Amino acid sequence: MTILVDSAVWPWRGRLWAHLISDTSLDELHAFAARLALPKRSFGGDHYDITDELRDCAIAEGAQPVDCLLYTSDAAD
Protein backbone atom coordinates (compact mmCIF):
# COMPACT_ATOMS: atom_id res chain seq x y z
CA MET A 1 0.00 0.00 0.00
CA THR A 2 1.53 3.25 -1.11
CA ILE A 3 0.01 6.67 -1.52
CA LEU A 4 2.09 8.92 -3.76
CA VAL A 5 2.06 12.69 -4.10
CA ASP A 6 3.89 14.57 -6.83
CA SER A 7 5.40 18.02 -6.59
CA ALA A 8 3.05 20.98 -6.36
CA VAL A 9 3.90 22.49 -9.74
CA TRP A 10 0.49 22.65 -11.44
CA PRO A 11 -0.79 26.26 -11.41
CA TRP A 12 -4.53 26.89 -11.10
CA ARG A 13 -6.50 29.74 -9.57
CA GLY A 14 -3.36 31.47 -8.34
CA ARG A 15 -2.05 28.45 -6.43
CA LEU A 16 0.20 25.48 -7.03
CA TRP A 17 -1.37 22.03 -6.98
CA ALA A 18 -0.17 18.44 -6.68
CA HIS A 19 -1.70 15.04 -7.47
CA LEU A 20 -2.40 12.43 -4.81
CA ILE A 21 -2.59 8.86 -6.16
CA SER A 22 -2.49 5.25 -4.98
CA ASP A 23 -0.32 2.54 -6.48
CA THR A 24 -2.81 -0.07 -5.28
CA SER A 25 -6.47 0.90 -5.51
CA LEU A 26 -9.01 3.67 -5.58
CA ASP A 27 -10.41 2.37 -2.27
CA GLU A 28 -7.02 2.99 -0.66
CA LEU A 29 -6.86 6.43 -2.24
CA HIS A 30 -10.36 7.40 -1.06
CA ALA A 31 -9.60 6.19 2.48
CA PHE A 32 -6.43 8.28 2.60
CA ALA A 33 -8.27 11.30 1.18
CA ALA A 34 -10.90 10.92 3.90
CA ARG A 35 -8.14 11.10 6.54
CA LEU A 36 -7.16 14.47 5.02
CA ALA A 37 -10.85 15.54 4.82
CA LEU A 38 -10.52 16.15 1.08
CA PRO A 39 -13.78 17.11 -0.62
CA LYS A 40 -15.11 14.71 -3.26
CA ARG A 41 -14.92 17.50 -5.85
CA SER A 42 -11.11 17.31 -5.68
CA PHE A 43 -11.18 13.76 -7.10
CA GLY A 44 -10.27 13.65 -10.78
CA GLY A 45 -11.05 10.10 -11.87
CA ASP A 46 -7.79 8.51 -10.71
CA HIS A 47 -6.25 11.15 -8.44
CA TYR A 48 -7.00 13.97 -6.04
CA ASP A 49 -5.87 17.51 -6.75
CA ILE A 50 -4.39 19.00 -3.58
CA THR A 51 -2.79 22.32 -2.71
CA ASP A 52 0.84 22.68 -1.77
CA GLU A 53 -0.20 23.04 1.89
CA LEU A 54 -2.24 19.83 1.76
CA ARG A 55 0.71 18.12 0.10
CA ASP A 56 2.73 18.76 3.26
CA CYS A 57 -0.11 17.29 5.35
CA ALA A 58 -0.31 14.24 3.07
CA ILE A 59 3.42 13.61 3.47
CA ALA A 60 3.09 13.97 7.25
CA GLU A 61 0.31 11.33 7.11
CA GLY A 62 2.54 8.91 5.21
CA ALA A 63 2.24 9.74 1.50
CA GLN A 64 5.48 9.22 -0.41
CA PRO A 65 6.69 12.28 -2.35
CA VAL A 66 7.65 11.65 -5.97
CA ASP A 67 8.97 13.83 -8.77
CA CYS A 68 6.61 14.86 -11.52
CA LEU A 69 7.07 12.58 -14.49
CA LEU A 70 6.06 13.38 -18.02
CA TYR A 71 5.06 10.44 -20.15
CA THR A 72 5.19 10.30 -23.91
CA SER A 73 4.05 7.63 -26.30
CA ASP A 74 7.70 6.59 -26.59
CA ALA A 75 8.01 5.95 -22.84
CA ALA A 76 6.58 2.43 -23.11
CA ASP A 77 9.02 1.39 -25.85
Image (cartoon, helix red, strand yellow):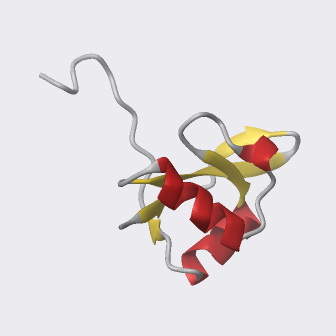
Q: Is residue 44 above or below residue 74?
A: below
Q: Residue at x 70, y 54 (%)?
A: 50
**Can you name the residue that lies furthest to the front here?**
27
User: Where is residue 59 shown, x and y percent of the image?
Assistant: 56, 75
Which is more toward the observer, 13 or 2?
2
**Foreground of the two, 13 or 49:** 49
Q: Quadrant of the C terminus?
A: top left
Q: Position of residue 48 (x, y in %)?
A: 64, 48
Residue 29 seen: yes
The residue closer to the viewer here, 51 or 21, is: 21
Residue 56 % position (x, y): 65, 74
Does 77 sit above or below residue 45? above
* Image quadrant containing the N terminus: bottom left
Side (left or right) of 12 relative to 68: right
Q: Measuring from the top left, give residue 28's x and y in whole percent.
A: 49, 60
Determine whether, in the image, residue 69 is placed left or right of residue 45. left
What residue occupies the far left of the structure in this picture?
A: 77
Question: Going 36% across and 54% down the picture, which residue do you hit?
Answer: 24
Q: Quadrant of residue 47?
A: top right
User: Going by the picture, which residue comes out furthest to the top?
Assistant: 73
| Side (left or right) of 27 relative to 76 | right
Q: Is residue 6 visible?
A: no
The number of discs equals: 0
Q: Quadrant of residue 53?
A: bottom right
Image position of 37 (left or right of 17): right
**Residue name at image x 61 percent, y 72 percent:** 58
Furthest toward the bottom, the residue is 60
70 above or below 63? above
The residue positioned 39% from the left and 42% from the top of the image is 69
